[in-house]
Image (cartoon, rainbow, N blue to C red):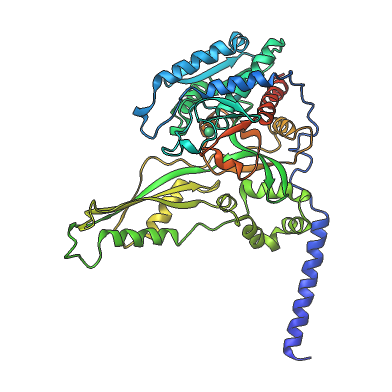
Amino acid sequence: MNVAGKIALGLAGSVGALAAVAAIRTATYEAPGAGVGTGAEVHLAAAPPVDLQRAASHLAEAVSFRTISHQDASENDAAEWDRFHAWLTDTYPAAHAVMSREIVAGNTLVYTWPGNDPTRNPIVLLAHHDVVPVTPGTEPDWKHPPFAGVVADDAVWGRGTVDNKGSLIGLFEAIEALAASGFEPGRTVIIVSGHDEEAGGAGAAAAAQLLKSRNVQAEFVLDEGLLVVADFPLLGRPVALIGIAEKGYGTLRITAPAKGGHSSTPPPQTGVEVLAKALLAITSNPFPMRFEGPAADMVRTLAPDAAPAVRMAVANEWLFEPLLVRQIAATPAGAASLHTTIAPTMLRGSPKENVLPQDAAGWINYRIAPGHSAERVLQHATDATRGLGVDVEWVQPPYDPSPVSSITSDGYRVLAAAASNGGQLPVAPGLVNATTDSRYFATIADDVYRFQPLVLSLREIEMVHGTNEHLTLDNLRRMIEFYSQVIATAAR
Ligand SMILES: [Zn+2]
């Protein structure tokens, strides 16, 4: 046998051994904490009956209040918040009879439904009531005007139906029905409705601070974040994803100082060129993607239901990690879940084409993965641009990623049971790439979850902050029943 032959045989031998090990591990693979996190063992309390038409007209009315968080807060119409709050009080009398209301930071609502047993930790449920503006010029693209509050084609149409007035109305419909049915919570139930989630969430921050000052330690906190993805790529069928962490956030401004002057007599390189080099130096050195954290937990949890190849890869991460990373990174959302993302978004040069810039600046928006920190992001940018003479600084104080919440807690089990729709849907933990009001509540709870029981396809998710935002009546019913079951079960 020649040398090449020996090597080939040796390789075949090792591949054979690897395959045998991989096959055994695949056959014996169990999801982390298999049996836990499905909520199969949770006995859910029954939800009171839902009057869907009435709930739909309530949501339609809620949409008609223009509680719009503009980029420039001075454009906000404060009276709309007052009118909305008064409407909420009038519309849900039973809920307002059992809950006390406080207002913090101007317009954020904090409701308390006291439990019979003050020794048990409260549950805290969040749903903000501000909405993003409709992009000027896109109004004619809407099937129904975005603030008209139209119920048509088995859906409620308008800005905020999904993000996030739908959740708030779902919560109030649930509480109204529970209160009217005579339900009395054992645990205290706290509802926080932020007034400025789309503009930084100062209201939620103040609410969390208020609860902290009262030494509230919540059993769990629930906010928006993830949902039921109808066409989840890994399984090709609906999967309920419960967010157990969210990414951190920060924007760096990179400034290249320059002398300015007439562009007919430029220096060897203008500020714009220095800035371009600095931006490329940063973006060409991305943070490596890793199969770890909540995104990896998601795939591990779903692997037993996935195709044999996925199961095999997950059972043998030591061998297939690069393959798993490549698969998940095939979509931008998947890629984002595996590392800290770097997105240059804004640029500034000189004010005129024949004027040299006196300084040139670029803004880079970062979404920081769990396990990473803002400090490491700044270090990365500083190291990458060393020697270019640029300034690197945070535009506003950044914040680090949230802690990662438990997937075996009682709270997670109740949410998973209610989300699984009677065990019909696979449930998995996941990472929220965006930010929510819930990030402020890590100070009062170990377990902060982010989930709305809506079923949306990946395509439909684009309507959130986009055109033709609407909530189907099926989804509205799911939402009301989910919140009813969660409150009646977790706080019974
Ligand atoms: Zn939202």
- Please state, as top left, top right, bottom left or bottom right, where the N terminus lies in the image: bottom right
321 is higher (above) or lower (below) than 79: below
Q: Quadrant of the C terminus?
A: top right
> Where residue 43 sits in the image (x, y, percent)?
79, 26
Please tell me which residue is depicted at 54% across the width and 58% down the height of the picture: 288
**Position of residue 433 measured from the top left corner of the image (x, y, whole percent):** 55, 44
> Which residue, as the protein is rendered here, is positioned at the far bottom?
2
Q: Is residue 309 visible?
A: yes
Question: Which quadrant of the view contains residue 483?
Answer: top right
Q: Is residue 36 left or right of residue 363?
A: right
Residue 156: percent from the left, percent from the top?
60, 28
**Closer-to-camera residue (280/464):** 464
Residue drawn where x is 74% and y is 35% of the image: 420
* Residue 261 position (above or below residue 414): below
Tell me residue 282's x, y (percent).
Answer: 41, 58
Farthest top residue?
A: 97
On the rendered structure, is 201 left or right of 180?
A: left
Task: Determine the residue positioned at 57% across, 57% down.
Answer: 289
Q: Is residue 372 above or below residue 274?
A: above
Residue at 51% across, 51% down: 340
The quarter holding residue 54 reads top right
From the viewer's perspective, is 233 left or right of 369?
Answer: right
Evaluate whether residue 122 shows in this view. Answer: no
Q: Nearer the viewer, residue 393 or 44?
A: 44
Q: Is residue 186 left or right of residue 348?
A: right
Give 97 or 321, whichever is nearer the viewer.
97
